[in-house]
Image (cartoon, rainbow, N blue to C red):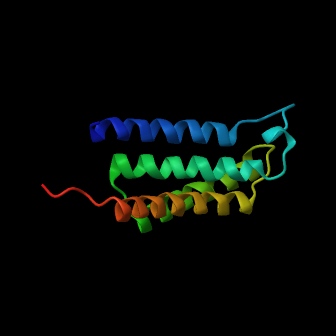
Amino acid sequence: MPQQFYRILCILGFAVATASFLAELQGYRVAGGLAHLDKLAHFIIFAVLSGLLWKGFKLKLIPAVIFLSSYGAAIELAQHYFTRRNGDWLDLLADIVGIISFYLCRALWHYIRPRRQA
């Protein structure tokens, strides 16, 4: 698929993630009340955002970690100060682990299955 498609998908992914992270969830128990299931959601969302960012903009590990970690921190601060939800530093840790996990899986994939010689 063309890189432009992944750029649009990446921007849409960020828009949906931002809206869901800042949504007021009145009357709903996040993750059905299961302890720390929201951390898994943060991990998965940031792993997917990392993949979209890489496919759309070819961001390397360090710039991606800085950009996405800053985004995750901004989300947690916004939740704390502008919504009735609580900002949680463990959510930010789950975000960072999701980012790094994507890049580790990508590196492992390329190690196991090297690119074909043309």
On screen, residue 46 above or below 4: below
Residue occupying the point 75% across, 54% down: 87
Q: Quadrant of residue 106?
A: bottom left
37 or 19, which is in the foreground? 37
Residue 27 vs 39, above or below: the answer is above
The quarter of the picture where residue 3 lies is top left
**Which residue is found at the position 73% from the left and 62% from the top?**
90
Q: Position of residue 2 (x, y in %)?
A: 27, 37
- List the single residue furthest toward the top: 27
Q: Nearer the viewer, residue 30 or 63?
A: 30
Position of residue 68 in the picture relative to residue 3 (left or right): right
Tell me which residue sits at (81%, 43%) in the image.
84
Residue 63 location, x and y as percent? Answer: 42, 64
How many discs appear? 0
Residue closer to the observer: 19 or 90:
90
Query: In the shown orientation, is residue 72 left or right of residue 50?
Result: right
| Image location of residue 56, percent across then percent down | 35, 46
In the rendered view, would you say 6 is above or below 40? above
